[in-house]
Amino acid sequence: MKPINKMKIEFWSISANESFARVVAASFAAQLNPSINILADIRTAVSEAVTNAILHGYPDEQGIVQMECTLYPEHIEIVIQDFGKGIDDIEKARIPLYTSRPELERSGMGFTVMETFMDSLEVQSEPNKGTKVIMTKRLI
Amino acid sequence: MDIRFGKEGNTLIVYLDGEIDHHTSMMIRERIDSRFLMEPVKNILLDFSKVTFMDSAGIGLILGRKSKAASVGGDLKIRNPRPEIRKILKLSKIDSMIV
Ligand SMILES: Nc1ncnc2c1ncn2[C@@H]1O[C@H](COP(=O)(O)OP(=O)(O)OP(=O)(O)O)[C@@H](O)[C@H]1O
Ligand SMILES: [Mg+2]
C-alpha cells in the first residue's frame, strides 16, 4: 500500500518530551478522522515507547529520540527509535510485568500496553546500538 | 498536573487534575507521599475525575502508593477514571481498585 503522508521529528531524551511526542503523533493521525478511542490508544502507545527510549535507552546520558509516522489510506505506522543502551533479551523485556528498574516504581507494563493498544508491534534492538519500535494501528 | 488534597475520616483524598506519565509521576509521587506522612490517615483515595491521560507510569505510581498505605494497615482506591484509563487499569489487573 502506498503512503499518503509522512513526517519525522527528533528530540532530546528529556521527560518533558513524552507529552510532546504523543500529542504530535495523535494530531498527525487525526488527519484520517479516526475515533477518539483510536487516538487515545495511539497517545498511550507512543507515550510508552518514547518513555522507554528516554528512561531505558539513555539512563545516564542525554541522547536523541526519533519518531517517524507514515500515514496509509487506512492505517498509521509509527517508528520510535533511540541510539542508546539497547535490549539484551527482547523476548524477556516484552513479558508482562518484567522491568529492569523496579526501584523506579516501573510496573513493567509498557510493552504489554503497546501490544494491546496497537494492532502490531515489532521491537528491534542491539546492545549499545539502540532500540527501534515499530507499531501500526488501523485508523478507519 | 495540579494536585489538591482532602480528608474524610482516616482517608486522604487526592484530587488529580491533568496528565499522568513518567514526567509528571515523579512530582505526583513526592506530593502524595509527603502529605500522607503529615496527615493522620491510613487510606488513600485517588480521585481521577480530572485525569485526562495515564500510561504505565501511572500503574507504577498507583501500586507504589498502595504499598505505602498497606505499610500502615491501610488501602488505596481509585475513583472515577475515564474509559481509556479504565482500560489500562484493567489490562494491569488493578481495576478492582476502582470504587
Ligand atoms: N528503548 C529501550 N532501551 C533499552 N531498554 C529498553 C527500552 N525499552 C524497553 N527496555 C527494557 O525493557 C523492559 C520492559 O519495558 P516496559 O516498557 O515493558 O516496562 P518498564 O519500562 O520497565 O516499566 P513501565 O513501562 O511499566 O513503566 C525495561 O525495563 C527495559 O529493561
Ligand atoms: Mg516502559
Image: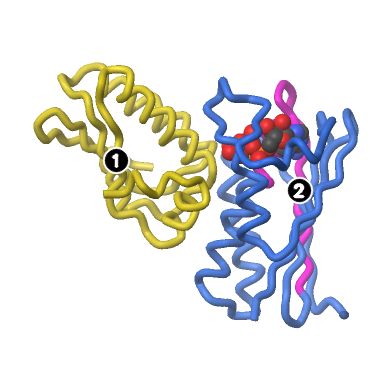
Which residue occupies the foreground of this view, A43 or B92? B92
Q: Give the colour of chain B.
A: yellow
| Magenta highlight on residue A78 | no
What crowding class fits label 2: few (fewer than 14 Cα within 10 Å), some (14-19), or many (20 or more)? some
Look at 59% across and 50% down and name the residue there: A20
Q: Is A28 above or below relative to B37?
A: below
Q: Which chain is blue?
A: A
Q: What numbered label is drawn on residue B77? A: 1
Where residue A30 sits in the image (x, y, percent)? 60, 73
What crowding class fits label 1: few (fewer than 14 Cα within 10 Å), some (14-19), or many (20 or more)? some
Which residue occupies the foreground of this view, A131 or B72? B72
Cα separation, mark 2 vs mark 1, equals 39 Å
Are the numbered discs 2 and 1 placed on the same chain, yes or no?
Answer: no
Where residue A115 sits in the image (x, y, percent)? 67, 55
Dot 2 amino acid type: Glu
Q: Quadrant of the C terminus of chain A?
A: bottom right
Residue range in magenta is: A49-71
Look at 88% across and 30% down and name the residue there: A127
Report whether A135 appears left or right of A97.
right
> Secondary structure beneath disc 1?
strand
> Secondary structure beneath disc 2?
strand
Report whether A99 appears left or right of B15.
right
Tell me the residue that label 2 is attached to: A10
Q: Is B27 above or below relative to A21?
A: above
Dot 1 amino acid type: Lys
Q: Is B99 above or below relative to A55?
A: below
Mark 2 or mark 1, which is nearer to you? 1
Q: Is A47 above or below relative to A52?
A: below
Look at 37% across and 59% down and name the residue there: B82
Q: Chain of mark 1?
A: B
Q: Chain of mark 2?
A: A
